[in-house]
Amino acid sequence: MKILVIGSGAREHALVWKLRQSPQVEHVWCAPGSDGIAQMAECVSANLTDVSNVADVAAKLKPDLTVVGPEQPLVLGVSDEFAKRGLSIIGPSQSAAQLEGSKVFAKEFMQRHGIPTASTYGIFDSAVDAYTSLCEVDWPVVVKADGLCGGKGVLVTSSPDEATAFIELLMETKEFGDAGKRVIIEEGLTGPEISYMVLTDGEKFVPLAASRDYKRVFDDDKGPNTGGMGAISSDDLISKEVEKVIQEKVVRPTIAGMARDGKEYKGFLYFGLMMTASGPKVLEFNCRLGDPETEALVMRMNFDLAALLRAAVSGNLEGVATRWDPKVSLSLVLAAEGYPGTPKIGGVISGTREVRDCAIFHAGTSKKEGDEYYVRSGRVLNVAAAADSIVEARAKVYGAAKQIFFEGMHYRKDIGKETASAANRVARP
Ligand code: AMP
């Protein structure tokens, strides 16, 4: 098999790393990839904001299938362009990718199909109406921009002033352009969060192991939201019983609802769930694999990912066996100074070659001349490992993090510190 991976971050590096282990895989390209990914895949340039350019790249390379990492090309319709040209791709159509591309679409979809989610105080396209609605809410509330804002479009707050300022930022200052034209104001939920992903062919699905990401920049979930600072995956995150509830109340109705609405969903589908006292509720959908969850998941995949992808594109998911290593895995993001604000870039990175026992996935690095890697963007490296216990996994990953250095490097120290057994205590809805 020849496989093309679309993207350039640590998630795509992790996919390449896993695909390269398959005896069925003869060649892997990554578009556009990165200097780090070039260690194990042939990188080819591509403009991910131009879906016909991405399809041109695939048409030239002729891979057996293409798998898309980031959401943007999917939301822009890359799968439709591939389908038009008869090229195989893992990823939903543009209309199905609205589950991630528009939070208003997702909320109305969930309401229509009875999928558990936070109740809303309203969906607004007027800032004045949004401000007025704040007089009649129970705090905390959550204010969400409709469109893609790179993880910065959601505010959870108990402060009317903060909520007002955020609505102003989205709807009047237009910080995120059209993405903030409409906002949702919804109930603030509490409980542990779980990332649950599946691969679906539009009808059947294969679940991936549960994981959890850590979105806030500082320990103890302090500071602003980021694209993710680390993740864990373990069989202990949710019990089999809770997983069944997730599948029956959330996954199946979502896949069936999309099909019923004429927007059949094919590809990876990510459910961001809050495990509340009244059962799992959907916070968000993503139309692709999570990052940094994928970096933790690949460490536990005791099956051939390439075979799974091939089964998905040929509509053959039934009977595909996925075997997950019972180990616990952990992925840790090493971030640049200033991240999630403007990162300080350009610093030289040392120590990665001395790391043993962990995988190093490159998120935002580049080479200049010579062999040295430099900081290229906010999330710089991802260090991942699996072990028999969370204590050992933490020891491996944090041991490796101590060996790596670049000026201004920061990372959370508490990834996986309290394990997530709380999710299992959740009552059934
Ligand atoms: P989203 O992009 O919708 O997943 O939101 C980003 C983060 O905001 C989530 O991971 C949660 O931590 C938080 N969040 C979103 N919606 C809610 C909600 N209704 N109640 C509490 N927290 C929320």
Image (tube, rainbow, N blue to C red):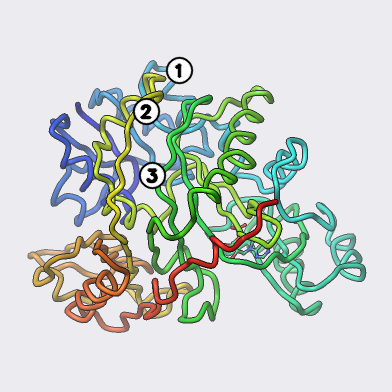
* Front residue of 47 and 229: 229
Residue 261 place in picture, x, y as percent: 69, 25
- In this figure, which residue is indicated by the disc labeled 3? 69
Q: Residue at x 17, y 62 (%)?
A: 367
| Cα separation between marks 1 and 3 | 20 Å
Distance of mark 3 from mark 2, alpha carbons? 15 Å
Please state which of the two labelled residues, at mark 1 or mark 3, is closer to the viewer: 3
Residue at 52% from the left image edge and 77% from the top image edge: 221
Quadrant location of the N terminus?
Answer: top left
Gap between marks 2 and 1 measured at Cα: 10 Å
Rendered residue at 34%/40% (across/down): 6
Please tell me which residue lies in front, 170 or 402.
402
Looking at the image, tell me whether mark 3 or mark 2 is earlier in sequence order: 2
The image quarter in which residue 320 lies: top left
Label 1 sits on a secondary structure element that is helix
The amino acid marked with disc number 2 is Ala
Is the CB atom of the residue marked by disc 3 within 8 angstroms of ligand 1's nearest atom?
Answer: no
- Residue identifier under label 2: 55
Quadrant of ligand 1 in image:
bottom right
The residue that mark 1 highlights is: 84
For mark 3, give the secondary structure: loop
For label 2, the crowd category at 10 Å Cα-Cα, with few meaning under 14, some 14 to 19 and many 20 or more, is many
Judged left or right of residue 397, residue 188 is right
